[in-house]
Image: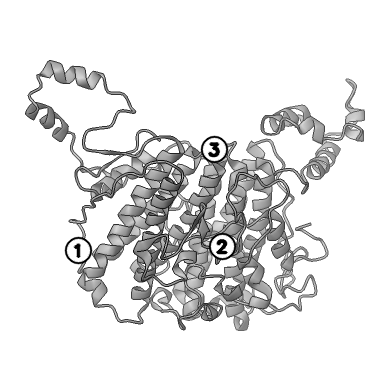
Amino acid sequence: MSTKLIPSSQPQLSDLDKPLYSPIKRRSFFMYAGATAGATALVLAGCSKSDSTPGMVNVGSNDVGVLNYAYALEQLEAGFYTSLRTGTYYTGLAAGSAEKQILDDLYYHEVIHRDFFKAAITGAGATPIKALTPDFSAVNFNDRTSVLSTAKAFEDLGVAAYNGAGRRITSPNYLVIAGKIVSVEARHAAIIRDLVSEGTFVGSDVVAVSTSSTEISKDPATVAATANMYLAEGSKLDVSGI
Amino acid sequence: MNIFEIISEIEKVDPEVYDRLDSRRSIFKHMSGLGQKLTAAAVPLAFGAILNKAYAQTSTAPSVVDVLNFALRLEYLESTFYNLGLGTIGATATAQQTAFRAAFSATNLASLDIIRLDESNHVTALRTTITALGGTPITAPSATFNGVNGTADFDFSGGKGTTAGPFAGLFTAAGAATFLAVAQALEDTGVRAYKGGAPYLMSNKDVLTAALNIHSVEARHASRLRTMRRAGIANNTASRVAITGTTEADRSASPKSWISGNDNGGPAPMYTAPVYGAGSAPSYTPTTLSAPVFPAENNVIQGGVTLSATTLTNTATFPALSYSEAFDEPLDVPTVLTIARTFDTSTKFFG
């Protein structure tokens, strides 16, 4: 049994992580635009990794790309915790209940994270990505299980994303910022997981408990594949630049 | 073992290794010729001591191996702590440990056992990584329980070896709540320590990722321990228990799963305040880091932005404490060592 901290292979995607976004839509676009098969091939041949895929939001590259990537994920989380506040699961929670306190705090924290990134990217003289349109059609905000399992997925995803992004950051300042946020996301993930099932704050789906007990971090492409399931057309992320 | 191979391996992570090793030391005198007079058994001990001296706390920035060995010290502190209270994995629990375990609810005990396993795994993984980098892991501290509050190397009562410190009895059933309080302080310290060390791992991206992947697990631990403290040792659905009190002053006894302001100084403010307070930047701290570099946990200046209802207009109705809750803060090595020395004995494991 390996206790190496540096794994030799990426973890497998769960069923939930497999992307629903279908590439057929892009071919349809070219057909509607009147392009012939030959012209289509030329256009595609000219595509490089850094070209934006039509309709997707390209986070950019280098440190600003990573900041915009984080901004995108925080937008998704903030949007989720905002949306849930109108669902009957949340509105039905007793005023002094643990779950209401926790969901309130998570809403405050994620909105703060989101708006902090927009301010920080702007302050650094760079351009933040646009306000994304989420797609929460798969979530039933009137149902505790649906809300909490989605919250769990987002928080765990955020931890894995920040940890996987660390190596792509070149400025120590930005690494520190990412570090300050990821531990809070991990605290969030732990309590949400406990609300779903007591004592699952650490589980084999997110931590390599049988070897090194390290978090299973994810690279941007893997994270985007899951995040894009919850982002509307025109707001899906292209992270190929980071 | 091949000393020269090890030195050249270390050279890959520390090009200045030859400057650090004192060439006047006898180890090199004897190895200068073809006839090596040192026995194979003597060399590792002497060489280890030389390396330890070369990489002891200096005024220069820590190397990758330095950071990992520092993390390893903290992991040993934590791992020993859980082993003494809960029993070591695979060993037969003593009568005291059995009674201690019985003080917790089933889900709380299971959670503590998970944390115990994780810390043990972290120790192993760090040792393996340090060795793979060509470094020498620190010598393991004693694992032999004195049956009271610690080992030859750690006094978890906080009594510096007297076993009569403020946390005395924490490994007994009657002291189980104190155990959770110390556990929270240890895990919150660990999170801050890993965060402070991350910038010094940027030269090795695999190791940086591994450290980040330990850091977030410590944060999961801290969250769960706080949840269990909030609900009480015997509560079997701790996550369902709300905080009591609405101000920061209430957080010592009834913590959130995240740090609120300075958490009123933590579980035992007279002793745990430094865990949540400001550190101070050592001379080698990169000047490119934004101020404040090692602030207290109630810090609200992030990336040069002072977070408030004015700067983040969507947050106008948010509680004032939420700005500090949303971010954890790093801590510098000297301050972490000071905190860790709370549990030192005369062997001075933390120097």
The residue that appears at 56% across and 65% down in the rendered structure is B297
Any part of residue A94 in sight? yes
Query: Of discs 1 and 2, which sits in the foreground?
Result: 1
Alpha-carbon span between mark 1 and mark 2: 37 Å
Alpha-carbon span between mark 3 and mark 1: 40 Å
The residue that appears at 38% across and 50% down in the rendered structure is A118
Provide the chain ID for the residue under circle 1. A
SS state under label 3? helix
Label 2 Cα crowd, 10 Å radius (few <14 / some 14-19 / many 20+): many
In the rendered structure, which amino acid carries the disc numbered 3? Lys
Q: Please, is residue A64 above or below residue B253 in the view?
A: above
Image position, residue B169 (x, y; %): 68, 79
Provide the chain ID for the residue under circle 3. B
Alpha-carbon span between mark 3 and mark 2: 28 Å
Image position, residue A82 (x, y; %): 28, 63
For label 2, the residue is: B116
Query: Of discs 3 and 2, which sits in the foreground?
Result: 3
For label 3, the residue is: B205
Any part of residue A1 in sight? no
Same-chain check, marks 3 and 2: yes
Specify the quadrant of the image occupied by residue A18: top left
Q: Please, is residue A75 above or below residue B151 in the view?
A: above
SS state under label 1? loop
Q: Residue furthest front?
A: B310
Q: Please, is residue B255 above or below residue B328 in the view?
A: below
Label 3 Cα crowd, 10 Å radius (few <14 / some 14-19 / many 20+): some
In the rendered structure, which amino acid carries the disc numbered 2? Arg
In this orientation, which residue lies closer to the viewer: B316 or A164? Answer: B316
Provide the chain ID for the residue under circle 2. B
Image position, residue B289 (x, y; %): 59, 47
Label 1 Cα crowd, 10 Å radius (few <14 / some 14-19 / many 20+): some
